[in-house]
Image: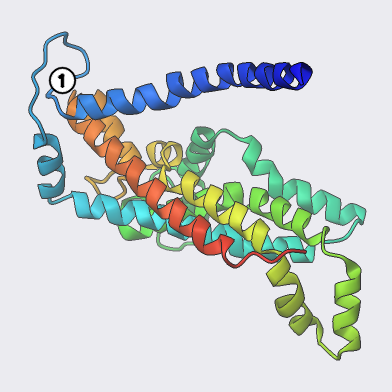
Amino acid sequence: MKKILNSKYIINIMYLPVVCLFLMFIVYPLIKGVSISLTNWNGYSEKFAFIGTENYKKMFSDRNFSLIIKNTLIYGIGSTVLQNVFGLIYAVLLDNKSRVVGFARAAIYLPIMVAPLIMGYIWYFMFEPVGGAVNDILTLLNMETVDLLTKGTTTVWLITFINSYQYVGFAMMVYLAGLQTIPEDYQEAAKIDGATSTQSFFLVKMPLLIPSITVNMVTNLIGSLKLFDIIIAMTNGGPGYATQSLSTMMYQLYFAKQDAGYAAAMGLFMFLTIAALSIVTLLWLRRKEVEV
């Protein structure tokens, strides 16, 4: 009995480092952020005043805030849909063990290894209005040049596509892992019952892929809703507020406008938005999971 108690005591003691790290890097910064959002601190001065909910009133009355929310949702939901659709298509097409397939998998996954900021600059130099690779090609073909980096909503969708292109390999690998855990007996039984390959996929494989879909949807949604690096590299949130997300706006409020209190309020709103959407998505998909 003493040995059991001692072992449980030791296990509980081993939780302490994790709990301390969680309190230090998650709970404390969150509480500190909430307190800063209730002040007019500029991010540098030792002097600041408590102003209550003024930063939140300012945020919701800002005429550009609705555009920033719209852009953030396009980045988040748009990227999640594109990554999951194309990730699943790639996984289905590459679900075998030939050398060519192995090369294709590596090629699709490779962009993840590039830093997002570098990826953004690569695409920026491709679409740059003057001297960009795309416009140079169009000039050689005697075609009219284009400026896709100042087109508002078009630019937002371009950034969404680039973010999806970079991370679709992650979704593909998760779906591949899910497909390879499905017993072949299920597919053979479906064929015996007269199911076509399309019916077999949607009626047998898709229900068993729900856990993989859950992982991809939630991780993609969280990552895309806080998209930052690619936006900064390609447009810096411009022109004006046309491509701003909550992340980039929070960055500019803190460093460019020296309004840390307002930035903290926007950061808390972003945290609650991402948490709410992620939890709702997770709970909805969990209900649909099927035991293999």
Q: Name the residue located 50 percent from the left edge and 17 percent from the top edge.
A: 20
Q: Is residue 254 above or below residue 248?
A: above
Give the side of residue 89 with respect to residue 144, left or right.
right
In the foreground, 163 or 27: 27
Q: Residue at x 57, y 16 (%)?
A: 17
The residue closer to the viewer here, 246 or 208, is 208
Which residue lies at the image location 13% right of the left edge and 25% below the top edge? Answer: 39
Quarter containing the C terminus: bottom right
Q: Quadrant of residue 37?
A: top left
**In the figure, residue 151 lies in which quadrant?**
bottom left
Residue 40 seen in the figure: yes
- Relative to 141, is 124 above or below? above
Q: Which residue is mark 1?
A: 41
Residue 159 picture location, percent across and down: 44, 51
Looking at the rendering, which quadrant does residue 50 occupy? top left
Relative horizontal placement of residue 53, taking residue 264 as reference (left or right): left
At horizontal 75% and vertical 22% (from top left) the residue drawn is 4
Look at the picture and state if 97 lies above or below 122. below
